[in-house]
Amino acid sequence: MDTLSYKTVSANKATVQKEWLLVDAEGQTLGRMASKVAIILRGKNKPNFTPHVDCGDNVIIINAEKVQLSGNKWEDKTYIRHTGYPGGQRSLTAEELKAKNPASVVERAVKGMLPKNKLGAELFRNLKVYAGAEHQQEAQKPKTINLNDL
């Protein structure tokens, strides 16, 4: 057997085929949807996945305001941040955050599932989240996908 015919192919920026995908969040459970979107952003669903390269697709999420949370999570789930000053810890419930900025709930869920490094920050820029059904990426001709089929 010729071992040289089985070389591992590593993707790089020049060889990656990126697509624009459209996901409708209406009726989707937040965590399940976010984990599937994170896999698509990372490129783990592609056969030429390379861990240190942005080989994922660009994802547009619409209807973020209609995302679901199970149980009492709208009241119980808290988002904590710190101002940087002593005693500056602030928190919001999921319900309060949704009232303030519905897209932020989905963005935080997906961002938490991406790597915590420069690559993760670059991957997060490939995500666009909109509260309503309208989005500004019509020129990219996004392909609509159903996350339940993944």
Image (cartoon, helix red, strand yellow):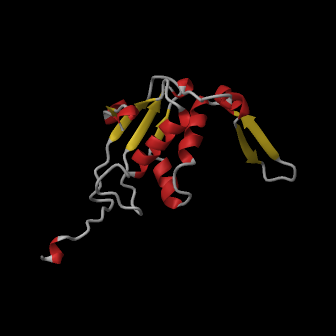
- The quadrant of the picture occupied by the N terminus is bottom left
**Looking at the image, is 71 positioned above or below residue 119?**
above
Q: Position of residue 86 (x, y in %)?
A: 87, 53
Front residue (pair 112, 2): 2
Q: Disc count in the image?
A: 0
Residue furthest left as drawn: 1
Relative to 137, is 114 on the left or the right? right
Relative to 109, is 134 on the left or the right? left
Would residue 137 be seen by someone viewing this image from the given angle?
no
Point 35% across, 33% down: residue: 145
Relative to 105, is 24 on the left or the right? left
**Looking at the image, is 25 positioned above or below residue 125?**
above
Q: Position of residue 148 (x, y in %)?
A: 39, 32
**Looking at the image, is 46 positioned above or below residue 93?**
below
Q: Position of residue 150 (x, y in %)?
A: 36, 38
**Looking at the image, is 94 positioned above or below residue 14?**
above
Point 41% across, 63% down: residue: 52
Front residue (pair 5, 134): 5
Point 79% across, 53% down: residue: 84
Point 40% across, 34% down: residue: 147
Front residue (pair 46, 89): 46
Residue 137 in which image quadrant: top left
